[in-house]
Image (cartoon, helix red, strand yellow):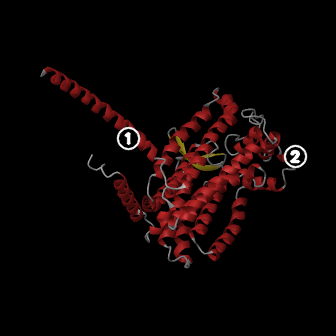
Amino acid sequence: MANPPTTVRTGTTRTGGGDRSAGAAARRANGAVVAVRQLFVAETGAFYTILGVTLFLVVFGVVMVLSSSSVEQYAATKDFFGAFTRQGMYAVIGVPLMLVASRLSVRFWRKWAMRIVVAGLVVQALVVLTPLGYSIQGNRNWIRIGSFTAQPSEILKLALALGIGAIIYAKRDKLDDWREVFIPVGLAALGSIGLVLVGKDLGTAIIMMLLVFGALFIGGARLRHLGVGVLAIAVVVPFLTMSSSSRSSRISAWLSGCTNSNQYQDLCWQPVHGMWALASGGVFGVGLGNSKLKWSWLPEADNDFIFAIIGEELGLIGAIVVLVLFVVLAIGFVKVIRTSRDPFVRTVTGAVMVWIVGQALVNIAVVLGLLPVLGVPLPLISAGGSALIMTLVAIGVVLSFARVAPDADTAVPVDGHLVAAQRSAAAAAARAGRAANPGRGAR
């Protein structure tokens, strides 16, 4: 009579050990899944709007880089997929960085804002003041260390957005005094934009000017003070454009509508062929991968003029879809601005919105012939590692703001932190959970 219980007990013990081992493995697997899901957990619809549009534009951009660059890549390297592989690698780096940035707090970004500004200024100074910098098509805006190359001005864009946000936050009760706001902002902006202009990159400098004014406007700077700044820029920009003979020639050719046949083979080649690409696409396009202008007819087909290839291959419908996506992205940014009471959050979000959406509109306007050729890429779509990665990190910063529910703003203290609101919400959720499962604690 004793043997059966012994046998059963031994078997039960072994089975239980196996169950515990399998259960532990299952819990570890579930924990990993939960950890990944936490990267995408948020309390606002704006978070998912911005994230979804961004990821779609990145994937779409990688596809269009493959389509627009394959011919030139094969002619240069006998490899159709060179630019596509690099762009895909940049996306693989940038998207995780965006998700990591989205997990950081407002406190973190505000604490490190001015340090990021200093770091950006130092790196940009290395470009224009040391042999580490090198020029491409007359613009000294790149840094090279061994085989590594980067465009530090992209870092400066994010640094300016964060820096102006930190200044507006610190001076939020002194916005009526122009000296309290415009002196520190002016020093940061003049240092950053000045270093970019020393490298002769007017296109990037214009985008940074838009970023600064957008941040100040949304951050609450007085319109009369901004008006003085706009007048000053209106006086300075003509001198900047005429300070370079190649730049002034491009602008003159644009103003003349490229009607001079002597300029067709030189200054007007790119804008004219960009218009031809758009015109040949019609309403529905010639089909993905079927562009004719990318066969060495359109310079920078995978970069500054990639929108022309989109219009040629995907037609008017494809071009409108791209425009709509940037509009939806802007709507997501505006929702974050409208639902936040923190001046730092509002200012930085506004700066990033003006940077990305404004740069997209400038790029498209250049392709349409509404602006002279400025050499700015189409955000999230054009080929280029520095631009893509830093744009994704900037969007990650906004996602970190959008992660918190707007209702929590009603409990935000003066410094804008959400700690008290988050703790109260967590405590309420814990009490509700214990009330729904009274026996859970005992187990």
Q: Quadrant of the N terminus?
A: top left
Which residue is identified by label 2? 261
Q: Is residue 440 above or below residue 209?
A: above
Dot 2 or dot 1, earlier in sequence: 1
Q: Residue furthest bottom?
A: 177
Q: Callout 1, which amino acid?
A: Gly
In this view, the residue in front, 95 or 157, is 95
Which residue is identified by label 1? 31
Q: Is residue 281 above or below residue 415?
A: above
Residue 218 pos. (x, y %): 59, 67
Relative side of 134 to 122, left or right = right
Relative side of 269 to 23, left or right = right
> Residue at horizontal 75%, vertical 56%?
248
Q: Callout 2, which amino acid?
A: Ser
In this view, the residue in front, 420 or 382, is 420
- Mark 2–mark 1 Cα distance, whole angstroms, equals 67 Å
Q: Secondary structure beneath disc 2?
A: helix
